[in-house]
Every structure is written in structure tokens, then in C-alpha cells.
Image: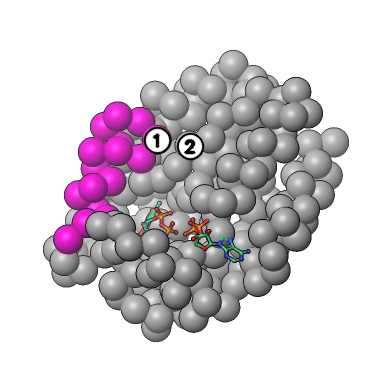
Amino acid sequence: MTAQNGVFITFEGIDGSGKSTQTRLLVDYLTSLGRNVILTREPGGSVGAEEIRSLVLEGDPDRWSAETELLLFTAARRDHLERTIEPALAEGKIVICDRFVDSTRMYQGLSRGDLREKVDKLHNLMIQREPDLTILIDMDPQTGLSRAKGRQTAEERFEDFGQELQVKMRHGFLDLAQQYKNRFRIIDGGQAIEDVAHDIQLAVSDYLS
Ligand code: ADP
Ligand code: TYD
């Protein structure tokens, strides 16, 4: 499972920070430059992983323990990697992925007990791949949560853990960006959509050149 020439770009940030909006805009931008791009997401991005997505994102917040959740997210990621990400990278495509292992490092690694070491061990064992570039959309947790809650979907298990979790996740992501300085770019998500998109375009163009 080794990719040849593709570029793997991930988006991270708290719920409602604008990842889905900005991944779509980045795909449009790169496509307009003639780049071969695919957009995918986690949990999901392949048929099997999308089935696991509904298991982890719907229902009662206490439906799974943090450990079980870690195994489910990792199973979904392995399927996504085998069937979607690695083949696209091997064809030389730019793969843009809405969340990846850094979300597991945060949500399962930090949120309920300290599972970070297990997250990293399982990642090294079953996934291995790290992104080439990670765009962290940083923003105020309260605004993020109210944007996310405004969407009204069934996928609210994590949003139902509330604002305290969002605050913890925000700081966790900023710490992670320090830990993986080379691949992280921090973008201010509190701006208008077009301004956030512009900052992301600059960061990605800079990386690609
Ligand atoms: P995420 O994927 O990070 O949860 P979304 O892209 O789905 O975030 O955005 C959450 C909500 O906030 C959507 O309704 C979206 O239209 C809106 N939104 C996204 N970016 C901005 C922004 N910069 N300013 C105001 N609203 C935004
Ligand atoms: P997502 O659909 O990206 O939600 P949002 O658009 O609100 O940001 O992801 C859904 C939830 O899944 C999100 O609250 C974070 C959580 N999640 C994990 O807990 N672990 C993971 O490994 C991933 C990829 C997501």
C-alpha cells in the first residue's frame, strides 16, 4: 500500500468550524487549476466505512465506550484507506479528506479518559499513513457548536457531548499542530467564508509549489 505521486491533504477542527464548506471550495479551486482532485470524508469515504459512520454518529452519546469507538473508527479508516485513499494517491490524485487520524487522536484520545497512547499504537499497527498537509480550521467553540447545532441532522452524538468537549478539542488540536508542526497549517475560521477560503488557497498553493 504505497502511494506514488499523490498528495494527501486533511482538514481538522471542532464541529461546525467550516471543514465541509472549505473542503468543497478547495476542490473547486484546485479543479479550476486543472488538478485531479477527489473529496472524501471520515468517518466514511467508502461503502463499508459509511455503514460504520451511522453506528458511531447516531444515537445516544453513551452508546459506545471510548475504547469500542476507537476500534470502530479505526476499522472504518482501514476500509477507507484500502478502497479510496491509497488507490487515488497511487493514481497521482490530490486527496482532500474531511477529518482523519488527528480527529481520533483528539476525540477518542482525549475526550473520555486518556486513550492517546492506544490511539497511536493502533494507528501504527493498522493505518500508518499520516497526511502530507493538514489544514486546521481554528475557531471559538461556542460559535462552532451553534453553527453545528443549526444543521439539524441525526448525526449529533458528538455535538451532544456539549461545549466543554468542544473547548477541550480546540486546545487539543492546537497542541497537536505544535507536535506535527511540519504538516499543520492553522487557519482562522472566525472570518467570512471567502476569507477563510483565501487563506486555505494560499497555504495549499504554497505547499504544492
Ligand atoms: P464542519 O464541517 O466543520 O462541521 P460546516 O462547513 O458544515 O462545518 O459549517 C457549519 C455551518 O456553518 C454550515 O451551516 C455552514 O454554512 C456555516 N459556515 C461555515 N463557514 C462559515 C463562516 N466562515 N461563517 C459563517 N458561517 C459559516
Ligand atoms: P463530522 O461529520 O466531520 O462532523 P462535523 O461536520 O460536525 O465536524 O464528524 C462527525 C463527528 O465524528 C465529529 O464530532 C468528530 C467525530 N469523530 C471522532 O470522534 N473520531 C474520528 O476519528 C473522526 C474521523 C470523527
Left or right of 190: which side holds 126? left
Amino acid type, mark 1: Gly
For disc 1, the neighbor class at 10 Å (few under 14, some 14 to 19, many from 20) is many
Q: Amino acid at mark 2?
A: Thr
Note whether 62 is above or below 196 in the view shown. Answer: below
Residue 56 highlighted magenta (yes or no): yes
Tell me what residue is drawn at x 36 percent, y 40 percent: 44
Q: Describe the element under mark 2 as helix, strand or loop.
A: strand
Q: Which residue shows up at 44% across the image and 75% down it?
A: 146
Residue 108: x and y, percent?
A: 34, 63
Q: Main secondary structure of the magenta part?
A: helix
The local secondary structure at tag 1 comes to: loop
Q: Which mark is residue 40?
A: 2
Left or right of 2, for residue 109: left
Whole-percent x, y for residue 104 in the image? 40, 57
Q: Is residue 69 above or below residue 171?
A: above
Quadrant in the picture for residue 9 = top right
- First in sequence, mark 1 or 2: give its number: 2
Which residue is rendered at x = 24% and y = 53% of the image?
56
Q: Please name whichever residue, 16 or 7, is drawn nearer the observer in this view of the structure.
A: 16
Give residue 45's mark.
1
Residue drawn where x is 75% and y is 23% of the image: 34
Asked if the residue at tag 2 contacts the one at tag 1, i.e. Cβ–Cβ closer than 8 Å, the answer is yes
Task: Please state if 166 lies on the left or on the right of 62 as rendered.
Answer: right
CA separation, marks 1 and 2?
5 Å
Q: Position of residue 199 (x, y in %)?
A: 77, 56
Residues rendered magenta in the picture:
44-59
Q: How is the image coloured?
A: one colour
